[in-house]
Amino acid sequence: GNGHFSKANAFLISHGRDPIDWQLPESV
């Protein structure tokens, strides 16, 4: 429900960067 992360990803994408995967890795 929080749009902050999607806005951050949209910002990165608009600058030609890969969107951030905010999920924690399932295995280290």
Image (cartoon, helix red, strand yellow):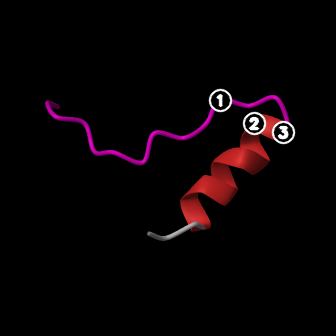
Q: Let me know if residue 1 is in the magenta part.
A: no
Farthest residue in the front direction?
Answer: 1
- Residue ID for mark 1: 18
Say what amino acid the circle numbered 1 marks: Asp
Q: Secondary structure at mark 2?
A: helix
Instruction: Check if mark 2's residue and mark 3's residue have beta carbons within 8 Å.
Output: yes
- Residue ID for mark 3: 14
Q: Position of residue 20 (x, y in %)?
A: 54, 41
Task: Tell me the number on the disc at residue 27.
Answer: none
Residue drawn at the location 14% of the way across and 30% of the way down: 27
Q: Quadrant of residue 19?
A: top right
Cα distance between the residues tagged 3 and 1: 9 Å
Say what amino acid the circle numbered 2 marks: Ile
Drawn side of residue 5 relative to residue 7, left or right = left
Which segment is the magenta one?
15-28
Residue 28 vs 8, above or below: the answer is: above
Say what amino acid the circle numbered 3 marks: Ser
Task: Tell me the number on the disc at residue 13.
Answer: 2
Cα distance between the residues tagged 2 and 1: 6 Å
Residue drawn at the location 74% of the way across and 42% of the way down: 12
Q: Let me know if residue 22 is in the magenta part.
A: yes
Q: Position of residue 23 (x, y in %)?
A: 33, 45
Q: Position of residue 25 (x, y in %)?
A: 25, 36
Instruction: Check if mark 2's residue and mark 1's residue have beta carbons within 8 Å.
Output: yes
Farthest residue in the left direction?
Answer: 27
